[in-house]
Image: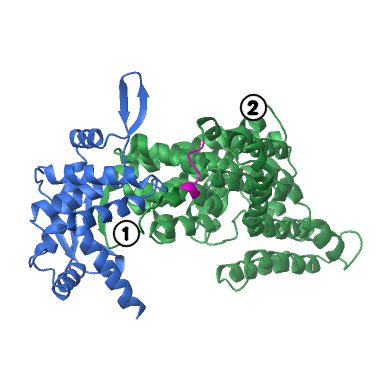
Chain colours: A blue, B green
């Protein structure tokens, strides 16, 4: 049941990603499932990346950001703190243990950095199986926008031992912040 | 009297800069005041009512029609999914190489820029292109700048712009085309350099955004959505260009050729009438702001060309206008920032009036003024944080127009320098 809801969130993320306007929900579901599986199976070789804590994430609408030049992960402390409070309010501590939101944010961004490696990219595209061009028996696999986001969330869930996808937290916190700003 | 006219122009610029008056209204007001200062009678020959307002308002009519047709074609590109399909294909082919996607969106923006300009052009390429670039890891400022630099690559081949320069400066279309062909390589090299250099400097960027997922996709959505446009329809933006540039067809029939090609390659015969009318009316909506501006520019041009205004301004303008080739390049390159923030060298503002003065007083040949204004247009179209396409692209990407200006200005300044060099060495 929970897995179905997580998958549904992933499908909705894909549906909201540009280039997928109006795509068949079944196809989006297939891609979301494959991307999640790929993310869960990923063995990320950790690189030395500077981690910086920042404020202003709630205003900018960000949990974390990865930049490749120079390699740095910015974790937005105010968003993480608000997310931890939300987990406590909703009684989700068994899914998201204390301190797991920050860890998930770091893991998410490390997964993005890993997905930029050419062999990993190629394997990911093959796994998704979306064809851009076919010439006889040769196939050129297409990039699926948004799939790397789902893989990064799945990796963070597995690496941090979370009971649910961080997408659930994203959805709930976005709704809470939007409600607070409107009232 | 020349000094008074220049002071009035400065007041006009201040009114535009401080947004006390919309540009079009400010230009008309300026024109009327300049005409009176130049000693024009109220009615009759070379008068305020008959010459400046009546003849001036319709002086750029051909440009207005070209703008309308470009907007119509832009609406068709949007409604038939041609622009969206181009971007989608680029992302699918090269999404895992962010630079490739940025170069692809740059190319699509350039194609769109040949058809239509301003915010509608940015929207055509950017609505899918900007979020798609951000999704593959292009930083937001780079993404917004890529669409603008791409449109600027297309601008030298934007047929309504040819028509504008041809009418405003009284030059044959062939002369305008000749200069634009020389300006194009500078715009192209700067735009490609922007994507390559900025991608290398800034790398990629990924975020975990605090964003609620959209509602569940449904099959009804799919039925409502238009499918991918067929591959041969994707050639639409090139059709007017091939007709005007390759086959020497006049501008309005070239644009109509593009409209017809888009229609027959994407639309079933029984739906053609409805689609043509719907997109034409949509085109009117898109074209309204630039057409209002061109009415005002026509009026201002008529005012500064009045004999009284020419006589008053000639000695002053001649005294400050560099005649030496190197000085010409140096001075006008340094003045580039004056076309930003609706400044006095903005071609679609008071800059048109100044160009009119330079031509009417015979200080520079019309073709040199074309080179100068076309070079400034390359800057204004990308970096001016008050121009609609820059504001739209920046805000849609989630950054400020000023960030985009700072990042793109060095590149477009170089384009203006290139254009001014060509002008000085070939036309002075």
Height in image: A63 above or below A43? below
Q: Is residue B242 left or right of residue B98?
A: right
Farthest-out residue, right: B44
Q: Is residue A44 left or right of residue B136?
A: left
Q: Which residues are magenta?
A: B223-229
The quadrant in which the N terminus of chain B is found is bottom right
Front tag of 2 and 1: 1
Q: Is residue B105 left or right of residue B326?
A: left
Residue, disc 2: B246
Height in image: B81 above or below B317? above
Report whether residue B316 is seen: yes
Report whether residue B424 is seen: no
User: In the rendered structure, does residue B228 fall within the stretch colored magenta?
Assistant: yes
The quadrant in which the C terminus of chain B is found is top right
Farthest-out residue, bottom: A183
Q: Are marks 2 and 1 on the same chain?
A: yes
Residue, disc 1: B213
SS for dot 1: loop
User: Residue under mark 1: which chain is it in?
Assistant: B
Residue B230 percent coordinates (x, y): 51, 33
């Amino acid at each position: 049941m929970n897995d179905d809801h997580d998958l549904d969130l992933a499908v909705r993320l894909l549906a909201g990603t540009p280039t997928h306007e109006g795509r068949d929900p079944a196809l989006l579901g297939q891609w979301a499932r494959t991307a999640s599986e790929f993310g869960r199976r990923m063995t990320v070789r950790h690189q030395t990346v500077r981690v910086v804590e920042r404020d202003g994430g709630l205003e900018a609408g960000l949990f974390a950001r990865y930049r490749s030049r120079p390699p740095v992960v910015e974790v937005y402390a105010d968003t993480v703190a608000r997310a931890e409070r939300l987990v406590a309010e909703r009684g989700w501590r068994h899914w998201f243990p204390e301190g797991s939101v920050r860890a998930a944010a770091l893991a998410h961004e490390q997964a993005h950095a890993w997905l930029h490696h050419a062999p990993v990219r190629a394997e990911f595209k093959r796994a998704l199986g979306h064809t851009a061009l076919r010439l006889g028996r040769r196939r050129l696999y297409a990039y699926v926008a948004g799939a790397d986001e789902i893989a990064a969330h799945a990796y963070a869930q597995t690496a941090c031992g979370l009971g649910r996808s961080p997408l659930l937290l994203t959805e709930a916190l976005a709704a809470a912040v939007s409600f607070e700003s409107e009232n | 009297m020349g000094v008074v006219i220049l002071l009035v122009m400065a007041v006009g610029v201040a009114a535009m800069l401080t947004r006390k008056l919309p540009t079009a209204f400010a230009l008309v007001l300026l024109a009327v005041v300049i005409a009176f200062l130049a000693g024009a009678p109220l009615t009759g020959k070379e008068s305020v009512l008959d010459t400046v307002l009546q003849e001036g308002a319709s002086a750029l009519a051909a440009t207005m029609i070209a703008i309308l047709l470009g907007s119509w074609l832009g609406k068709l590109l949007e409604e038939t999914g041609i622009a969206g399909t181009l971007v989608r294909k680029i992302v699918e082919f090269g999404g895992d190489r962010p630079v490739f996607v940025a170069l692809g969106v740059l190319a699509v923006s350039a194609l769109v820029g040949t058809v239509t300009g301003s915010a509608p052009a940015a929207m055509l390429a950017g609505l899918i292109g900007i979020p798609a670039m951000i999704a593959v890891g292009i930083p937001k400022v780079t993404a917004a700048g890529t669409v603008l630099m791409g449109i600027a690559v297309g601008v030298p081949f934007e047929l309504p712009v040819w028509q504008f320069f041809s009418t405003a400066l009284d030059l044959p279309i062939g002369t305008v085309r000749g200069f634009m062909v020389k300006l194009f390589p500078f715009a192209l090299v700067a735009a490609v350099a922007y994507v390559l250099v900025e991608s290398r400097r800034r790398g990629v960027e990924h975020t975990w955004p605090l964003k609620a997922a959209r509602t569940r996709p449904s099959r009804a959505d799919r039925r409502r959505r238009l499918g991918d446009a067929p591959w041969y329809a994707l050639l639409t933006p090139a059709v007017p260009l091939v007709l005007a540039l390759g086959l020497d067809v006049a501008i309005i029939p070239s644009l109509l050729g593009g409209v017809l090609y888009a229609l027959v390659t994407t639309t079933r015969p029984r739906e053609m009438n409805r689609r043509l009318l719907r997109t034409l009316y949509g085109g009117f909506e898109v074209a309204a702001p630039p057409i209002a501006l061109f009415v005002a520019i026509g009026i201002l041009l008529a005012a500064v060309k009045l004999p009284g205004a020419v006589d008053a301004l000639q000695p002053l303008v001649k005294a400050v206008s560099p005649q030496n080739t190197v000085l010409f390049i140096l001075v006008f390159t340094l003045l580039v920032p004056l076309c930003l923030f609706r400044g006095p060298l903005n071609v679609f503002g008071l800059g048109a009036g100044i160009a009119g003065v330079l031509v009417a007083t015979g200080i520079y040949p019309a073709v040199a003024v074309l080179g100068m204004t076309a070079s400034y247009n390359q800057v204004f179209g990308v970096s001016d944080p008050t121009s609609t396409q820059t504001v739209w692209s920046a805000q849609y990407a989630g950054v400020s127009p000023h960030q985009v200006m700072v990042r793109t200005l060095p590149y477009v300044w170089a384009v203006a320098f290139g254009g001014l060099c060509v002008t000085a060495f070939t036309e002075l």
